[in-house]
């Protein structure tokens, strides 16, 4: 028995409430984050949980594993450090039909869809074991589903949506995004495709991203409740100027900025990973960030950033096929700066070797040759949270490493970052135009972000506290729950009726 389990011996298991969505990006992650902070405000011991996640945006946990970034943000909403039990199964796609499978934070191998279907029983046991541990140490386990529960082709052996809810016998809330249109069809259609027992455990609806006069929506809400017999637990308004790290989709909305800004371009690779690295830049008032997609030309810029990649050699080939390497060469000739992060660092080197076929067919590829380094992919993945100093200006930096590459070469002598403990990271070119690092999250450190922007050509840099911005928006979400949802119904679904005392014995 673990220390945490021992400290709660004899306590009743915590309640579990699950949020499912009619579609991907319906608002599941956002609603779970909101509910977590709402409960945390009241002193309730709440923990986030996502049984199975498919995403290329991940975070490193306190126990040295890897989980989806959305669960790391939800942990912040709960006042907790991220833990692998919060997302026991993470799938990181490395092709259209295959993914790296991560169980309890550690990669167990690459599987195609058929192989993973056969592996689901093992994954199911990992999911249920993590849920039991969280339930033993917290009053409420707030669960996020994946995709939609109405994907009938995936119903067999489901561990992500209703299959999990049935296994642990928990109530479910269904959320839909009215901004997409067809919200009543989404809700009613999803309900119709569920089995009778699944329909019974769905306890209510939440409509997300509503703009307009609620009086005009009310007849539809009345019809929905009459048609389904399920209550509408809340209608959450569309939040302007709102940001929360995306689970997978890239947010390409343009944020209005002043005319005198630093122009930053990020090529969107097919297997781009941890694009949340660029959220602080997208929100920075002095940065105009542009994501360039397939078939688009790279525009003039001050800084080009090559992002992380789950399939570095394949993405290198894609980079060349788009003509983007020619644009990068032209950018450097005109004095622009080039930064590579993780897989982007590897691309900047002379060679990338994958002798065991970890990210695709075994073999090697020529890199861009802009840094005198070479990388070999090895089975053991480096997973660590780190702190140190950015060598450009001796600025404090923190971040995390998630990579299977082992990099060597003379340009490592000009490190990008000096980490605490004496280890160096990354490399710089002799002329100072090109730099690469394995650190994700480097722009979240205000001092390091400012130093990098000055290196890229921005004169007077305005410091921005990205963590404060994220905390502000988590608080705004909890405010929406307070103002627009049926709080009595929510407390009952969480096993917290009006007379429930906060349990201070749980962690």
Image: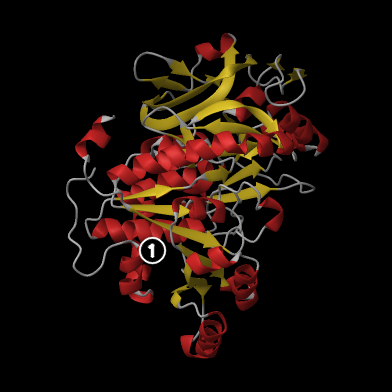
In the image, is 353 to the left or to the right of 250? right
Task: Describe the colour scheme in one phrase.
Answer: secondary structure
Instruction: Assign the N terminus to one quadrant of the image.
Output: top left
Taking the spot 61% from the left edge, 64% from the top edge, the residue there is 195
Q: Secondary structure at mark 1?
A: helix
The residue indicated by pointer 1 is 477
Out of 458 and 48, give the one closest to the viewer.
48
Residue 428: image location, x then y, percent: 55, 21
Residue 449 appears in the figure: no
Residue 327 appears in the figure: yes
Taking the spot 69% from the left edge, 26% from the top edge, the residue there is 359
Taking the spot 25% from the left edge, 68% from the top edge, the residue there is 497
Residue 154: image location, x then y, percent: 67, 51
Residue 495: image location, x then y, percent: 30, 62
Out of 67 and 414, give the one closest to the viewer.
67
Out of 296 and 98, give the one closest to the viewer.
98
In the image, is 394 to the left or to the right of 92? left
């Amino acid at each position: 028995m673990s220390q945490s389990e021992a400290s709660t011996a004899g306590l009743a298991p915590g309640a579990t409430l699950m949020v499912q969505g009619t579609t991907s990006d319906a608002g599941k992650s956002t609603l779970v984050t909101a509910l977590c902070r709402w409960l945390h405000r009241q002193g309730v011991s709440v923990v986030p949980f996502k049984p199975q996640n498919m995403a290329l945006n991940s975070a490193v946990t306190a126990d040295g594993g890897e989980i989806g970034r959305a669960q790391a943000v939800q942990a912040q909403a709960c006042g907790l450090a991220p833990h692998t039990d919060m997302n026991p199964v993470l799938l990181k796609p490395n092709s259209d039909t295959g993914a790296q499978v991560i169980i309890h934070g550690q990669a167990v191998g690459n599987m195609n869809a058929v192989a993973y279907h056969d592996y689901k029983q093992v994954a199911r046991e990992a999911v249920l074991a993590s849920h039991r541990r969280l339930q033993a140490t917290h009053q409420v386990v707030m669960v996020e589903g994946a995709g939609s529960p109405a994907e009938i082709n995936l119903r067999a052996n489901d561990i992500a949506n209703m299959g999990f809810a049935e296994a642990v016998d928990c109530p479910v809330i269904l959320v839909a995004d009215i901004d997409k249109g067809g919200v009543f069809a989404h809700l009613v259609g999803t309900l119709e495709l569920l089995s009778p027992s699944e329909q019974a455990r769905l306890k209510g609806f939440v409509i997300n991203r509503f703009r307009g006069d609620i009086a005009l929506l009310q007849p539809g809400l009345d019809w929905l409740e009459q048609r389904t017999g399920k209550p509408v637990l809340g209608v959450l308004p569309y939040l302007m100027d709102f940001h929360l790290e995306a689970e997978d989709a890239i947010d390409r909305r343009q944020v209005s900025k002043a005319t005198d800004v630093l122009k930053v371009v990020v090529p969107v690779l097919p297997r781009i990973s941890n694009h949340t690295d660029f959220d602080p830049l997208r929100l920075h008032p002095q940065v105009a960030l542009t994501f360039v997609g397939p078939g688009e030309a790279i525009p003039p810029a001050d800084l080009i950033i090559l992002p992380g990649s789950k399939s570095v050699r394949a993405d290198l080939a894609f980079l060349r096929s788009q003509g983007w390497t020619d644009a990068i060469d032209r950018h450097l000739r005109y004095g622009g700066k080039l930064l590579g992060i993780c897989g982007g660092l590897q691309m900047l080197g002379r060679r990338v070797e994958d002798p065991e076929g970890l990210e695709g067919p075994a073999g090697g590829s020529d890199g861009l040759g802009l840094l005198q380094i070479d990388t070999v992919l090895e089975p053991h993945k480096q997973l660590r949270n780190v702190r140190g100093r950015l060598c450009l200006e001796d600025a404090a930096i923190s971040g995390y490493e998630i990579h299977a590459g082992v990099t060597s070469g003379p340009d490592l002598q000009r490190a990008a970052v000096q980490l605490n403990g004496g280890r160096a990271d990354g490399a710089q070119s002799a002329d100072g135009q090109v730099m690469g690092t394995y650190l994700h999250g480097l722009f979240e450190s205000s001092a390091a972000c400012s130093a990098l922007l000055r290196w890229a050509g921005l004169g007077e840099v305005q410091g921005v506290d990205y963590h404060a911005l994220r905390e502000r928006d988590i608080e705004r979400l909890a405010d929406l729950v307070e103002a627009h949802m049926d709080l009595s119904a929510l407390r009952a679904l969480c096993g917290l009726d009006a007379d429930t005392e906060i349990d201070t014995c749980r962690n």
